[in-house]
Image (spheres, rainbow, N blue to C red):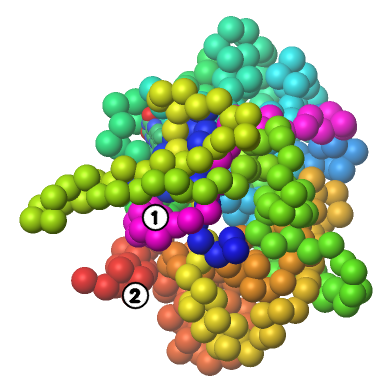
Amino acid sequence: MYDLIVVAIIGAVGIYFFFFKSSASSAIQSPSNVVSIATTTTGPRSEKSFYLRMKNENRQVLILYGSQTGTAEELAGRLSKDLVRYGQKALVMDPEEIDPEEFERICLIHNPLLILCVATYGEGDPTDNAKQLYEHFENKEPDFKGLRYAVFGLGNKTYEHYNAVGKFFDQKLEEFGAKRVFELGLGDDDGNMEEDFMRWREAFLPALAQSFGWEYNKNAGLERQYRLKIIEEPNAKVFTGEYGRVGSFERQKPPFHQKNPYLSKISEQKELHASASERSCRHIEFNIEGSRIRYEAGDHLAVFPTNDSELVEKLGKLLNANLGTIFKLINTDEQSSKRYPFPCPCTFKTALTHYVDICAPVKSHVLKALIEYTTDEAQKKRLNLLSTASKEGLVSFFLLFFPI
Ligand SMILES: Cc1cc2nc3c(=O)[nH]c(=O)nc-3n(C[C@H](O)[C@H](O)[C@H](O)COP(=O)(O)O)c2cc1C
């Protein structure tokens, strides 16, 4: 029933998938179920202060992500994995979980390092989850002497305020007395975010190691981040594509928001161009009757696409997996605030359909991880080349994933 597309009406969020992801725009042609979202959620504040966590868990690196659609969050996670090879266990956090008034306490940590991965939205605005930190930096003058930092901004050059939030944090931290350990990285998703990030990260990590005197250990960080657990209890509550509560698609309960979206029907859709026209523009109406969602002109619409069921089946066959198997992926870092990578338990089919991206080019860190499982020397060499941000590596990567 939910194998079609899911659409969201969000007060503040952009139309990312709608306009930027071609898979989403092609999926819009035959939808019948949509999800509407009235407002974005504000995540619950962690009970324990970030400072106490860093201190008690003996961490000197804090990585914060300002993310709306997950890219900055993913990059933050990748940097944290990179740092394991330098003997560092970073704390990755949503800035919304930090009390900005408490933020200065980071300087009380021994040799603290702050890394920010922050996206820009709207008119050069921060993401919803970075807003309170942004406003704090705008209105207060915290003292960050003794703190070292680096910022990677995510943006898009076609916008007037290109990467304004990354630039803002980079400059403010310097003004507040923190020391920049590496130049501001600017990722442009109109060009190639992955390449920009790979280039920045490959220069950033050695610079960081030099600044802190960390040693690189190529054998560290190879252990799995998640442990697989097959669930065999017959009455297990299983996610079927929901993002928040199990069963929330079947039993719809307000208030509706990003984690508890409202499923609505498309009540009308028609082509506005005449058949002779080569262009296409569709009029689409979503029925939100009875949902108590208020829609105002100017609100945005987002799409939560699902993967093509044929591809999911194909992948299942290739992996020789029973797609109906129910499983959990449990974070091996028990102190991590993220217990599961996506809603668990669920079936392999649900995970491949709703929660993981099976169509995008494989990311460089995944290619790097595969090297360790490859015995063939030629394949090892090839994977190494594909996952390196050298000129030759980047050309091979793009020829493989974006053939001309
Ligand atoms: C509605 C919308 C508005 C955006 N506004 C800007 C902007 O003003 N400046 C900019 O550099 N990038 C802008 N971007 C690009 C995003 O910052 C970029 O896609 C980023 O990778 C998103 O990261 P996230 O997935 O972590 O939210 C915008 C994107 C969307 C969808």
Q: Secondary structure at mark 1?
A: loop
For image coordinates 67% across by 80% down, the residue present is: 323
Query: Relative to the observer, which residue lies in front, 280 or 105?
Result: 280
Determine whether 79 is above or below 41 in the image. below
Determine whether 188 is above or below 364 in the image. above
For image coordinates 59% across by 83% down, the residue present is: 316
Q: Is mark 1 within 8 Å of ligand 1?
A: no
Q: Position of residue 11 (x, y in %)?
A: 52, 28
- Stretch of the chain drawn in magenta: 20-49
Distance from the alpha carbon under mark 2 to that under mark 1: 28 Å
Q: Residue 130 lies in magenta, yes or no?
A: no
For image coordinates 35% across by 39% down, the residue present is: 156
Q: Which residue is mark 1?
A: 28
Whether residue 1 is visible to the viewer of this picture, yes or no, is yes
Task: Give the residue type that dot 1 points to.
Answer: Ile
Q: Residue 44 lies in magenta, yes or no?
A: yes
For image coordinates 48% across by 78% down, the residue present is: 310
Relative horizontal placement of residue 395, taking residue 187 as reference (left or right): left
Query: Relative to the observer, which residue lies in front, 381 or 7?
Result: 7
CB-based contact (under 8 Å), mark 2 and mark 1: no
Ligand 1: which quarter?
top left
The image quarter in which residue 28 lies:
bottom left
Q: Position of residue 93 (x, y in %)?
A: 70, 39
Q: Which residue is mark 2?
A: 400
Check residue 164 in the rendering and tell me which mark sits there, or answer none: none
Query: Relative to the observer, which residue lies in front, 15 or 266?
Result: 266
Q: Is mark 2 within 8 Å of ligand 1?
A: no
Q: Position of residue 85 (x, y in %)?
A: 67, 60
Whether residue 190 is visible to the viewer of this picture, yes or no, is no
Task: Give the residue type that dot 2 points to.
Answer: Leu
